[in-house]
Image: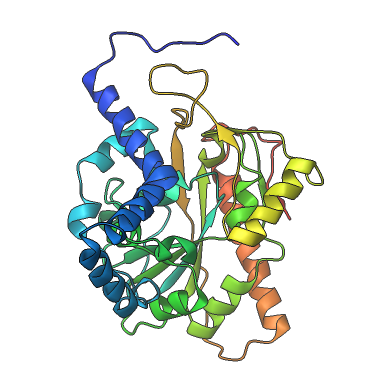
């Protein structure tokens, strides 16, 4: 394999952008393990009392990830996130104003490998979410597994990440006064195993739990499509039914998280590594779908709203695809 090295003379700003993405990838791939290691080392050292006190804190604080988390505007506004945004770059596009008197459920598509667009737009202020949508507070839902990791849980909650448990979404969507936005990567872990350049297949046909949540809380639905999300990484071939895919599905069922075998570029060369490619991400926030609260929705109610949502998502994609480089003959495929 021919290796393409980065040029020696690279502007400092681009180096800082790469460094910001390195720390982000590290956060999701290694920081959790580092936090566990630190906790264990404290536990078996003379500083075990600190680990014991923190364990007590974990117990007392166990419900926080499903009760709105503990966001920090200071962390969300770190300078590093502007470099992270500019690496790709990431842009957030508003199609219509959203009334802050309502609560909203944003369906984010596609999941991608590491949900870079979801993180950059909704867990930082780099793309200007609060300026584009005044009066709204966004929370990105993440698998509960990550909130069981000591220290790491406290860091990710600062950005507005909360547990994806049903109780967590219900807490946000039932808040009086409106202004709450629960962002759900609807395709979940299975969709991340399909993420690769050119992929337009979404796990949505049988995903109706978020529809039930919206109905029960009267939260307005908003389809969000992130153009470029699947272009950031290549992935080992893992077609359905292959040995690798069966292993990934088994591990996902056991661990609760997907393990896509992805690769892209490195820090000083562009041929292999775990950093995403520099490909633009354009996240389009579509038109809201009004929802009337229904505490006991029937199957027909759920199906009707689900159909409306799929039509809204398709509209967002079709109206914008040629602007962002997708040929006219390409369409979304729902599974």
> Which residue is at 31% across, 66% downward?
136
Q: Along the horizontal axis of the image, is 330 left or right of 36?
A: right
> Which residue is at 35% across, 34% downward?
22
Q: Is residue 21 above or below residue 168?
A: above
Residue at the outermost bottom position:
296
Q: Quadrant location of residue 299?
A: bottom right
Q: Along the horizontal axis of the image, is 22 left or right of 164?
A: left
Residue at the outermost left position:
74
Q: Is residue 186 above or below residue 67?
A: above
Camera-side residue of 40 and 288: 40
Q: How is the image coloured?
A: rainbow
> Which residue is at 31% across, 53% downward?
41
Q: Position of residue 62 (x, y in %)?
A: 36, 76
- Quadrant into which the C terminus falls: bottom right
Q: Along the horizontal axis of the image, is 55 left or right of 242?
A: left
- Quadrant into which the N terminus falls: top right
Q: Position of residue 292 (x, y in %)?
A: 52, 83
Camera-side residue of 148 and 47: 47
Residue 16 visible in the current orientation:
yes
Q: Position of residue 27 (x, y in %)?
A: 37, 45
Camera-side residue of 263 and 318: 263
Residue 311 visible in the current orientation:
no
> Which residue is at 28% across, 46% downward?
126
Q: Is residue 207 above or below residue 170?
A: above
Number of marks in the rendered image: 0
Q: Position of residue 81 (x, y in %)?
A: 27, 42
């Amino acid at each position: 394999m021919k290796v393409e090295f980065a040029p020696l003379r690279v502007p400092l700003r681009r180096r800082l952008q790469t460094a910001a993405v390195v720390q982000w990838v590290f956060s999701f791939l290694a920081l959790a393990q580092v936090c566990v290691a630190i906790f264990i080392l404290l536990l078996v050292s003379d500083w075990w009392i600190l680990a014991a006190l923190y364990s007590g804190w974990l117990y007392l604080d166990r419900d926080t990830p499903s009760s709105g988390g503990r966001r920090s505007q200071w962390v969300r506004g770190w300078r590093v996130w502007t470099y992270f945004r500019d690496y790709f770059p990431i842009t957030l596009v508003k199609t219509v104003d959203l009334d802050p008197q309502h609560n909203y459920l944003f369906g984010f598509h596609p999941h991608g490998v590491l949900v870079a667009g979801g993180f950059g737009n909704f867990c930082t202020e780099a793309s200007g979410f609060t300026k584009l949508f005044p009066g709204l507070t966004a929370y990105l839902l993440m698998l509960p597994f990550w909130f069981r990791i000591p220290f790491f849980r406290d860091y990710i909650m600062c950005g507005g990440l909360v547990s994806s448990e049903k109780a967590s979404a219900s807490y946000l969507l039932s808040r009086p006064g409106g202004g709450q936005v629960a962002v759900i990567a609807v395709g979940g872990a299975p969709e991340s195993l399909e993420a690769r350049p050119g992929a337009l297949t979404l796990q949505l046909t049988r995903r109706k739990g978020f529809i039930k949540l919206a109905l029960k809380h009267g939260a307005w639905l908003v389809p969000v499509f992130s153009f470029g999300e699947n272009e950031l990484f290549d992935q080992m071939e893992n077609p359905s039914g292959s040995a690798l895919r069966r292993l990934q599905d088994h591990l996902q069922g056991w661990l609760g998280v997907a393990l896509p075998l992805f690769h892209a570029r490195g820090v000083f060369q562009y041929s292999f590594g775990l950093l995403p490619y520099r490909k633009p991400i354009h996240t389009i926030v579509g038109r809201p779908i009004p929802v009337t609260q229904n505490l006991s929705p029937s199957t027909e109610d759920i199906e009707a709203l689900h159909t409306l949502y799929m039509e809204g998502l398709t509209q967002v994609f079709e109206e914008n695809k040629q602007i962002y480089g997708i040929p006219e003959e390409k369409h979304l495929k729902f599974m």
